[in-house]
């Protein structure tokens, strides 16, 4: 073996050993489909972000030694996650030869004794810690423990430790749709009404769900409603939120708040004038303006907040704040501070436990209470929307969307800094669609620190999202298995995959969904390891099948070959609606923005050939007649995906009204008005919630779906 000075760069072999110990991949699949090596420099940077310095041979060897010793510093792993019906051996570290006792304290307070971990054999693995010889023993956790969050205890003379124990369902039950079901998918902000303030809101969601449920839909899948900045200007993208746990007050319907009715007449008149200014754009095809709407709403909401609450309402608010706990407290403090300190301010760098937080928390007490109140109002209106969905006959109701990450200058990046890795951002390596890779700018969970915390932040996030929901769609669910970490300031290609404890992350997701009676849909598109989809199916997590992407080496996949455990749709929010896609508008748009990797003529030819293949498939199944109109073709494509065995079929609201424009064009920031397109029909005129029930295309497509799935 080659000898190195201590200050010299570590050998590749040593880096790879350390990478394996820290769950960092040393290779990835390149844009050409070949296996690419992660560079030494990238490995060193990512390992540093994983808490394992490796810039020199001495550092790498010390980090490798620490990785080997780290589990021995505790008797138990910090968190243990197991499936209910599968026994699980857990390694415990106790003084050699010492008697050990083990038990579980269930979340209801009762206790379950466990057989003592048997003394190890002579050949047992041992280590010396603080002068004490420790040995590794196996503690067997039995099958059949109650689902939930418990505490696992181990004690031996002079020492006792406990860890978080999460017992999760082996598998989520099938969706509550009485067989296969179809549902509507919408970008809520774009779906306005005569009563909303220029942006679709939670009362619109209730009405939209009622209309769709009455038409036969089993669910309403919407964009993420995560909170953005507390004051304008706010981020347009719902997939780059300030937090994933709390909701955006932009979606509040001011007039639906109970205290609104008790405002003095002059104040109500002022709010009605604010609303009228925003409603003037509802019948206008202009782009959505979140900042104008949110500024007006905040002014109105501050007035409503000052109205005294009845004793019952006051108790309800207090109960909500108490149940939300420290997470709401810290988020509200961030909101109050963020009005004065920009994201790049140095004061944020110390995190939640900073001098800034300590100094300002008392001073901003009333302001933080206002932001807590906003979350309570969101909670109430979300509850009303889900109730409306179920009352309209939906078996599932509203399905929320969980973004893959958060803004690097947002609330979670500050309040959850202790369990995140701020030195890196997540993205994607170079692939055939983007040969320089992608940087989403979002800081990831730190796997070790998240586990050490008992996954509390992750659990609480899921609970809030599922509190008034029938399901959750997890964007890029592959991120629960691995994420592409990019050191800050580096090009997207100079990163590496970091693996997560998917058994824990998926298990906790399944547990919280089971407790909420919710379905989980994983957006499992893109590059992934072959076993991942099978694992998710085994846990009852539905996958995603997109008509345009379901291809084999010989052409489009037969619908009968789609996965049963999936949500089947025609497209996604990153593509034009079906009418626009059939017209090749995605190619035209990408060409105009300089995003094509080949000549536009070649791109059009390839795209047209792929589209013809799908239309030919529809004709082969007798679903598409010669000379069919645009509407008839779109309906034929929906009949085609309905032939699949997929348990859920999604219908884009844009397809139900004849919209053609793309909501989001990946690879752009300011070049295209992403997330600002109001819902409109084929004539370009806005379509409001009140218009839907009588909209001929909406009525026709919902009738098609009911017939195709035998729903009436």
Image (cartoon, rainbow, N blue to C red):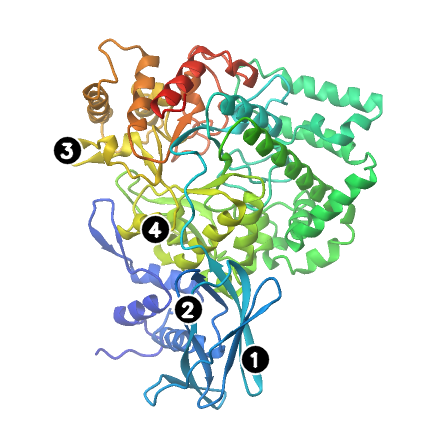
Q: Tell me the number on the disc at residue 374.
A: none
Is any atom of residue 415 visible in this view? Answer: yes
**Residue furthest to the left:** 554
In the image, 547 versus 301, the foreground residue is 547
Tell which circle, 4 or 3, labels the residue nearer the N-terminal end. Answer: 4
Residue that label 4 marks: 538
Measured Cα–Cα span from mark 4 to mark 1: 36 Å
Determine the secondary structure under disc 4.
Answer: helix
Measured Cα–Cα span from mark 2 to mark 4: 34 Å
Query: Which quadrant would residue 13 be assigned to in this image?
Result: bottom left
Residue that label 1 marks: 160
Measured Cα–Cα span from mark 2 to mark 1: 29 Å
Determine the secondary structure under disc 3.
Answer: loop
Pair 1/3: label in front? 1
Query: Which quadrant would residue 57 be assigned to in this image?
Result: bottom left
- The answer to whether residue 21 is left or right of residue 223 is left
Residue 479 position in % (x across, y down): 40, 50
Q: Tell me the number on the disc at residue 554.
A: 3
Pair 4/1: label in front? 4
Pair 3/2: label in front? 3
In the image, 8 versus 335, the foreground residue is 335
Residue that label 2 marks: 52
Q: Which residue is drawn at 23% across and 21% down?
A: 618
Q: Residue at x 21, y 79 (%)?
A: 1
């Amino acid at each position: 073996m080659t000898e190195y000075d201590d200050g010299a760069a570590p050998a590749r072999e040593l880096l790879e050993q350390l990478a394996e110990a820290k769950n960092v991949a040393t290779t990835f699949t390149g844009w050409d489909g070949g296996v690419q090596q992660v560079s030494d420099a990238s490995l060193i940077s990512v390992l540093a972000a994983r808490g394992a310095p490796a810039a020199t041979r001495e550092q790498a060897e010390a980090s490798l030694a620490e990785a080997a010793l780290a589990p021995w510093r505790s008797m138990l792993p910090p968190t243990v996650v197991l499936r209910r019906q599968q026994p699980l051996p857990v390694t415990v570290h106790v003084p050699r030869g010492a008697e050990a006792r083990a038990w579980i304290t269930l979340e209801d307070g009762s206790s379950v004794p466990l057989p003592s971990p048997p003394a190890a054999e002579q050949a047992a693995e041992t280590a010396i810690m603080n002068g004490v010889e420790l040995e590794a023993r196996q503690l067997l956790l039995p099958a059949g423990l109650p689902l939930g969050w418990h505490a696992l205890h181990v004690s031996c003379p002079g020492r006792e430790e406990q860890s978080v124990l999460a017992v999760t369902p082996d598998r989520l039950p099938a969706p509550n749709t009485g067989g296969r079901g179809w549902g509507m998918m919408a970008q809520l902000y774009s779906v306005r009404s005569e009563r909303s303030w220029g942006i679709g809101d939670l009362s619109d969601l209730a009405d939209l769900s009622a209309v769709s449920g009455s038409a036969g839909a089993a669910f309403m899948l919407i964009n993420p409603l995560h909170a953005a900045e507390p004051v304008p200007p706010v981020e347009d993208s719902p997939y780059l939120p300030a937090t994933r746990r709390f909701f955006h007050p932009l979606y509040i319907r001011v007039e639906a708040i109970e205290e609104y009715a008790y405002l003095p007449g002059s104040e109500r008149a002022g709010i009605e004038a604010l609303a009228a200014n925003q409603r003037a754009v509802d019948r206008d095809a202009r782009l959505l303006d979140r900042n104008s709407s949110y500024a007006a709403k905040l002014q109105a909401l501050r007035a409503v907040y000052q109205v005294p609450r009845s004793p019952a309402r006051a108790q309800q608010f207090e109960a909500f704040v108490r149940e939300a706990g420290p997470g709401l407290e810290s988020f509200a403090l961030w909101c109050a501070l963020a009005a004065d300190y920009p994201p790049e301010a140095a004061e944020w760098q110390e995190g939640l436990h900073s001098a800034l937080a300590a100094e300002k928390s008392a001073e901003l007490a009333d302001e933080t209470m206002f932001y807590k109140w906003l979350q309570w109002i969101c909670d109430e209106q979300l509850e009303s929307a889900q109730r409306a969905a179920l009352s309209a006959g939906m078996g599932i109701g509203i399905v929320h969307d969980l973004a893959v990450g958060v803004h690097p200058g947002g609330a979670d990046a500050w309040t959850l800094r202790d369990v995140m890795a701020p030195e890196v951002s997540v993205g994607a390596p170079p692939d055939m669609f983007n040969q320089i890779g992608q940087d989403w700018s979002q800081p990831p969970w730190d796997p070790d620190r998240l586990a050490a915390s008992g996954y509390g932040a992750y659990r609480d996030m899921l609970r809030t999202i599922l509190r008034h929901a029938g399901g959750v769609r997890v964007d890029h669910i592959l991120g629960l298995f691995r994420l592409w970490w990019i050191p800050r300031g580096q090009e997207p290609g100079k990163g590496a995959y970091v693996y997560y404890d998917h058994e824990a992350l998926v298990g906790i997701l399944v547990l919280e969904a089971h407790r909420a009676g919710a379905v989980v849909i994983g957006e499992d598109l893109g590059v992934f390891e072959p076993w991942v989809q099978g694992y998710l199916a085994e846990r009852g997590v539905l996958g995603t099948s997109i008509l345009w992407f379901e291809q084999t080496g010989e052409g489009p996949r037969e619908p009968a070959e789609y996965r049963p455990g999936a949500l089947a749709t025609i497209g996604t929010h990153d593509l034009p609606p079906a009418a626009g896609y059939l017209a090749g508008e995605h190619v035209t748009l990408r060409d105009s923005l300089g995003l094509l990797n080949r000549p536009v003529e070649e791109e059009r030819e390839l795209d047209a050939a792929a589209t013809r293949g799908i239309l030919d498939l529809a004709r082969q199944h007798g679903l598409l007649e010669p000379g069919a109109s645009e509407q008839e073709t779109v309906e034929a494509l929906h009949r085609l995906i309905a032939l699949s065995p997929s348990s859920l079929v999604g219908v884009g609201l844009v397809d139900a009204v004849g919209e053609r424009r793309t909501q989001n064009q990946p690879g752009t920031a300011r070049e295209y008005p992403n997330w600002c397109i109001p819902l409109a029909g084929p004539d370009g005129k806005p379509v409001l919630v009140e218009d839907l029930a009588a909209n001929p295309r909406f009525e026709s497509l919902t009738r098609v779906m009911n017939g195709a799935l035998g729903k009436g």
